Image: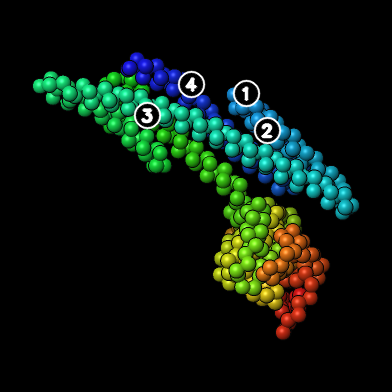
Amino acid sequence: MLTKIEREAKFTRETQLPLILSQTRNAVKTERLASLVRAIYLARDRRLERQIQLQIQALAQGFPFDAGERVVSGSKSVATLAKEIAAARQQARDSAGQSTAAFNFEERATAAYSQAIKIIDEMGKELSGDAALAADRLAKEIEAGAASTRNTVLLTLLMPGLFCVVLLLLARRHLAKPVLAAIGNLKRISENRPTLPVQTRPVLAELAMIGDAVLSYGYTASELRRKNVVLQALAEEDPLTGLANRRTLETYLQSALADKDKIGGTAVLLIDVDHFKSINDRYGHQVGDQCLQSLALLLVSLDRLPSSLAARYGGEEFVIVYNADNEEQALLDAAFVCRRIEAMRIPLEGEHSMTMTASIGVSFAPRGDAGGMNELILRADKALYLAKSGGRNRAVADHPVQARGRFSNARGQTAG
């Protein structure tokens, strides 16, 4: 039996554990690949896009063949889509004077980005599933070997007399204690708790190998859980600001529109930073990122908006979805947000600081409105265009609001 345990432990060390570690490394590569795809989609510089594209191609070629056909082919497809994103962006820049053509190329880049993220999500699920299956099989084999050893020890303890007592003491120290420690660590792993290191290494090499295998499995399982959390966060959050991403926003907005028990309706505030390109050109992209992060902190701290979700819609555009009594109240809230944004101070080098403004498009859907999510966002986008063309730094509804009074934005100008 011990020879069998030794053989299985050797197989675990030489075959199964390297397989699990290989899957973990592939999961890390998949996470890096997702970050690079987001980076090339958000980049606006041809040289930076080229550098990121080369990194994506190198990373895609680094997946081993034992990672699975879907993972290898998926990485190659992602590299192709990244190349398509960069090409579409370049064509959009070349067609800057033709708004329709530039918009079409931007749509191509967005479609390629969405497809690449979908492929990466599928790769992550397959890697996590394969590693979890191998780890579960390994745990069962180790637990079965440990249980067999424990049963043998218990039978040996039935021997009579002093020999039984001496054997009990020896077995407790050199057999039962390591086995029970291994079983205890397996239980801790199943309860998502960290494993405990062995205080005294067993004399028997077989039991030492079992203990080492359990500890290695515990470390691998912990790494897999951590990577799964990271992959889940990448799927739900914007990496720069920490706000909800577009996918989470759409899910939340659909749920809000389907809620028939709330009072009032659902309001959408589409926020766009004014002259953001000028900020990047004048102060650099690092300050531009700091502006976006400061705006994100402001949006999540607005206690005035009930049941709200703040999300990054793309680039310098943000969205707030919340429950409002009516469209008049939503427009007042948007004007309040304008004032708060204008009052922010972004620290620069030394004792200098800068300010920024934003334009907000407002749309509102009463409870039971069957217009749908896409129409509500389209209306907010239309209102945002009116706010931009009307001078910026203001909040505008998608159509005139029949209100009791006049609403003022951050500069005291009429909005809506």
Above or below, comparing residue 334 to residue 145 in the picture: below
User: In the image, residue 90 lies at what x, y percent?
Assistant: 81, 43
Q: CA distance from mark 4 to mark 1?
A: 16 Å
Out of 149 and 214, give the one closest to the viewer. Answer: 149
Closer mark to the observer between disc 3 and disc 2: 3
Q: Residue at x 74, y 34 (%)?
A: 80
User: In the image, residue 335 lies at what x, y percent?
Assistant: 68, 73
Going by the numbered disc 3, the residue's amino acid type is Glu
Residue beneath disc 1? 65
SS for dot 4: helix
Going by the numbered disc 2, the residue's amino acid type is Gly
Residue beneath disc 2? 74
Out of 126 and 370, give the one closest to the viewer. Answer: 370
Residue beneath disc 4? 15
Residue 143's mark? 3
SS for dot 2: helix
Residue 339 occupies which quadrant of the picture?
bottom right
Q: CA distance from mark 2 to mark 4?
A: 25 Å
Q: How many marks?
A: 4
Considering only order in the chain, which callout, 1 or 3, is on the residue closer to the N terminus? 1
